[in-house]
């Protein structure tokens, strides 16, 4: 996968294929989801509506503003207060990636050490008034990047606009994040099941933007041992969760091998938070 040819092959699966086994159809369908974030098989009664909504949204999405709410068909509610906004950041991906590059030039990605002494497989940096980090003394937010000795780079205006628009599409008005934690995943990197509990307000929403390689998200409950739902997230997808879902356990399964045209063998995730 990864060339224009296979993309077309998946796109052609719009008519019934009597020669295909159910298992192969299911696999192709999963590939279609991973590749372009939608489902185009006739068997899915909602696919046609979703495809039209996606295409219409993408046509308008290269506007410089984020004030266009996504079509209802592309918003999935995972739980009260938790939404997936399919493709919400797609048209802005290259701008976002360039901003990430310039942030990382000032505050480089680094593999943090947990209080337990393990080095995280995900590399991190931040922008905003504060930044999240971890060392043998614990997890916390601080205004100075301990690595550079300087304040974290300011949050780019375009980050703020995207985060506010996404929060609003998920029903959270006047979102004012003071930090964006930036995660960089190489193939095999993962985040084990955890809660985000270092922020003062345990209800204020978090907005997350996925870029590059796809990931499988674990969406759990309010206690660790509740079963988790698996949510595929692809390039351009945004997740927003707050209120009653804010303290849910979540994680990211190890990133699978791949080659994304914009990021190569990497996934980036922006998480906007209200820390203070
Ligand atoms: C929370 N990052 O940095 S954010 C983190 O993709 C973190 O890099 C992940 O968890 C990442 O702390 C995930 C997106 C997300 C999605 C669904 C959730 C967070 C969620 C459901 C419930 C709670
Ligand atoms: Fe988290």
Image (spheres, rainbow, N blue to C red):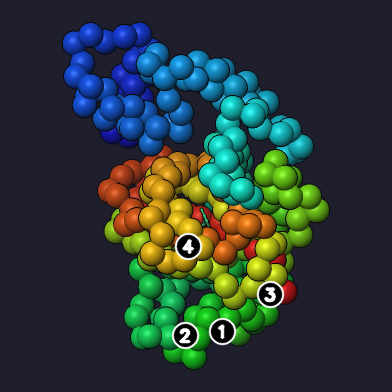
Between 9 and 170, the one lying in front of the other is: 170
Q: Earlier in the sequence, mark 1 or mark 4?
A: 1
Chain-order first, disc 2 or disc 1: 2
Q: Nearer the viewer, residue 258 or 189?
A: 189
Query: How far apart are the two marked residues, 1 and 4, measured between alpha carbons?
Result: 28 Å
Element at label 1: loop
103, 182: nearer the viewer: 182
Q: Mark 1 highlights which residue?
A: 146
- Measure how far apart labels 1 and 3 are at the Cα level: 21 Å
User: What's the residue at 33%, 27% (across, down)?
Assistant: 29
Q: Residue furthest bottom?
A: 137
Q: Disc 4 or 3, which lies upstream in sequence?
A: 3
C-alpha distance separating marks 3 and 2: 20 Å
Marker disc for residue 249: 4
Does ligand 1 reach within 8 Å of label 4's beta carbon? yes
Q: Which residue is mark 2?
A: 135
As helix, strand or loop, the secondary structure at mark 4 comes to loop
Question: Mark 1–mark 4 contact, CB under 8 Å?
Answer: no
Which residue is labeled 3 in the image? 200
């Amino acid at each position: 996968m990864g060339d224009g040819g296979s993309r077309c092959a998946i796109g052609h699966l719009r008519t019934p294929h009597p020669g295909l086994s159910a298992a192969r159809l299911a696999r192709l369908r999963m590939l279609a989801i991973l590749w372009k974030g939608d489902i185009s098989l006739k068997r899915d009664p909602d696919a046609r509506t979703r495809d039209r909504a996606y295409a219409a949204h993408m046509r308008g999405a290269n506007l410089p503003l984020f004030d266009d709410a996504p079509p209802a068909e592309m918003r999935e509610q995972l739980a009260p207060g938790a939404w997936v906004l399919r493709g919400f950041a797609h048209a802005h991906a290259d701008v976002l990636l360039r901003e990430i590059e310039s942030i990382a030039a000032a505050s480089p990605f680094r593999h943090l050490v947990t209080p337990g002494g393990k080095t995280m497989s995900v590399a991190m940096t931040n922008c905003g008034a504060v930044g999240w980090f971890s060392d043998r003394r614990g997890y916390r937010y601080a205004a100075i990047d301990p690595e550079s000795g300087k304040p974290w780079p300011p949050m780019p205006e375009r980050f703020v606009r995207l985060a506010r628009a996404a929060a609003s599409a998920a029903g959270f008005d006047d979102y004012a994040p003071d930090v964006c934690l930036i995660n960089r995943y190489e193939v095999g990197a993962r985040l084990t099941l955890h809660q985000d509990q270092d922020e003062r307000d345990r209800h204020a929403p978090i907005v997350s933007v996925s870029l590059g390689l796809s990931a499988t998200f674990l969406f759990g409950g309010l206690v660790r041992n509740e079963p988790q739902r698996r949510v595929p997230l692809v390039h351009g997808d945004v997740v927003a969760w707050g209120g009653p879902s804010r303290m849910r356990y979540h994680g990211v399964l190890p990133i699978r091998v791949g080659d994304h045209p914009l990021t190569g063998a990497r996934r980036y995730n922006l998480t906007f938070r209200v820390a203070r």
